Image (tube, rainbow, N blue to C red):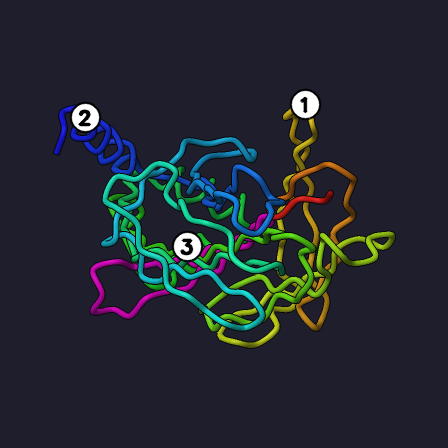
Amino acid sequence: MSLHRFLAVLAALLLTAIPAVSHEFWIEPEEYQVESGDTLNAHFRNGQKFKGSALAYFDKRSARLEQVVAGKSTPYAGRMGDIPAIGTIAGDDGLLVIVHQTAPQTLEYKTWEKFQAFADHKDFPDIRARHLDRKLPENGFTERYTRYAKALIAVGNGAGSDRISGMETEFVALTNPYTGDLDDGVQVQLLYRGQPRADAQVEVFEKALDDSVTIRLQRTDTQGQTTIAVKTGHEYLLDAVVLRPLSDDSPEVWESLWAAMSFAVP
């Protein structure tokens, strides 16, 4: 390994070791619209307010990474330390969906306040009562978290549909943002264990052409659906979190599952 690549890998390792307390994780293509045969690069990003650091590709941190077109899934494997994490050649025309499930990671909360802030942000206002009911310590406890991210990319005409991938929680786009009628917005469905997740908070990040970001909160209906109002030339990130207890014999006491979806509007 060359010295340059060694230093790049070392920097990436240090970056991915930084705890992501209440930070979103998403896939950000360098271009959301490409032609068949073009280079397609996409970053793993971790941050807040739709701005974040690029994370390197490490196979041990990915439980699942696939490119899906017209229901056909192709596994992707990069090189250790790659930034962008994904670098490939765009295939046939259609809607390309990158599906990524991270390996579980853990985070220790040394103080209650940080966990409360995270739970408040992600819409779990009863977390303190639930925590105390389980007779858990208020300091020095551990959470397990896993990310379930999708990115929608138009290759050529971008025609096609998003589909259920089978991840434990995920967004499914019911409207193709590149070919659909967007007068009423982009309709999405939020799933948990394959079932609609009703009355769940969805955080919507909207990035304008000048890179300014606006944030709004929406809720899903009884079918787990919500409609995202969109603007031409803007990028979008959707985020929703499941927070659930773990069994008494687990070293971690809570588990968070993060669903994310990114796309752009032509």
Q: Which of marks 3 and 1 is in front?
A: 1
Look at the magenta stretch and give its main secondary structure. Answer: strand
Left or right, 111 with reference to 182: left
Q: How crowded is mark 2: few (under 14 residues within 10 Å), some or many (20 or more)?
A: few
> What amino acid type is highlighted by mark number 1?
Asp
In the image, what residue occupies the spot 30% across and 59% down?
253
Mark found first going from the N terminus, 3 or 1? 3
Quadrant of the rendered image containing residue 82: top left
Disc 3 from disc 1: Cα separation:
28 Å
Disc 2 from disc 1: Cα separation:
32 Å
Q: Looking at the picture, how far across and down is residue 29, in whole percent?
A: 52, 42
> What amino acid type is highlighted by mark number 2?
Leu
In the image, what residue occupies the spot 27% across and 50% down?
106
Residue 125 visible in the snapshot: no
Mark found first going from the N terminus, 3 or 2? 2
Q: Which mark is residue 210?
A: 1
**Does the segment drawn in magenta span residue 55?**
no
Left or right, 96 with reference to 131: right
Q: Residue 7 carries which label?
A: 2
Left or right, 211 with reference to 55: right
Give 106 or 133, whichever is nearer the viewer. 106
Residue placed farthest to the right in the image? Answer: 183
Q: Residues within 10 Å of mark 3 (few under 14, many from 20)?
A: many
Mark found first going from the N terminus, 2 or 1? 2
Q: Looking at the picture, how far across and down is residue 217, in whole percent?
A: 68, 46
Circle 3 sits on which residue? 147
Report the magenta residues as a range: 238-262
Q: Residues within 10 Å of mark 1 (few under 14, many from 20)?
A: few
Disc 3 from disc 2: Cα separation:
27 Å
Helix, strand or loop at label 2? It is helix
Give 195 or 262, whichever is nearer the viewer. 262
Q: Looking at the picture, how far across and down is residue 98, in whole percent?
A: 49, 56
